[in-house]
Amino acid sequence: MRNFLTNCGWQAAGGGRRRGSVTVEMGLVLPLVLAFILGIFEYGRYLMTVQLFNNAAREGTRYAVAHLQPVTLGSTTYGNATSDVTNIVNGVLAGTTLASQNTQVYASDDLGTNLGTWTTAQAGQCVTVKITGNYRVGVMAFLCLPSSIPVTAQSTMDVEAN
């Protein structure tokens, strides 16, 4: 058995045992592997957040384009208030928020340039919903990342008719 252990490298050249080498190697490699795995998780969380905000902007724009004219049922008017669009956006976000989050709804051209109030958009113009804010990085100190990353989600859709 002694020759087998010697041939497999379990004893040092001088005949002493190498009991702590695995612990030292693990102590050096494990933090790097954990940092890499945490970085992958953080990047995935960032991409998920950006996609979620893009979807919310698109749903808000879809609602705004479909509700340019108000609908009155009984004595209550529904539809073309900016708060209605913001409620749709917040519903899609399902509680996910950015630091300093701001939602803008406005009439625009094809490039998303602000042309004024969205409820006055005519056929041939567009409506844009733009969400801005800062993504908070969860493990910034450990991975030497910034504490926040700016995020902008914007969706522009054509107004087909009023």
Image (cartoon, grey):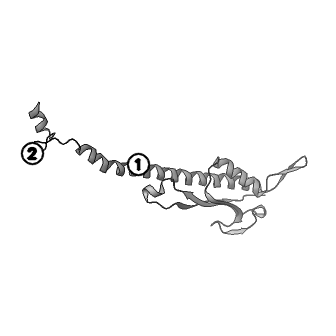
User: Which residue is found at the position 30% from the left and 46% from the top?
Assistant: 26
Q: Secondary structure at mark 2?
A: loop
Q: Whole-percent x and y of residue 75?
A: 91, 49
Of the numbered discs 1 and 2, the one sitting upstream in the chain is 2
Q: Secondary structure at mark 1?
A: helix
Question: In the image, which is nearer the foreground, mark 1 or mark 2?
Answer: 2
The span from disc 1 to disc 2 (Cα, nearest Å) is 39 Å
Disc 1 packing (10 Å; few <14; some 14–19; many ≥20) = few
Q: Is residue 84 left or right of residue 148?
A: right
Quarter of the picture containing the C terminus is bottom right
Quarter of the picture containing the N terminus is top left
Residue furthest to the right: 75
List the residue tagged with mark 1.
37
List the residue tagged with mark 2.
14
User: Which residue is found at the position 43% from the left and 55% from the top?
Assistant: 142
The quadrant where residue 102 appears: bottom right
Q: Nearer the viewer, residue 42 or 59?
A: 42
Q: Is residue 121 left or right of residue 139?
A: right
Q: Nearer the viewer, residue 3 or 36?
A: 3
Residue furthest to the top: 1
Q: Amino acid at mark 2?
A: Gly
Q: Amino acid at mark 1?
A: Ile
User: Which residue is found at the position 11% from the left and 38% from the top?
Assistant: 6
Disc 2 packing (10 Å; few <14; some 14–19; many ≥20) = few
Q: Nearer the viewer, residue 2 or 153?
A: 2
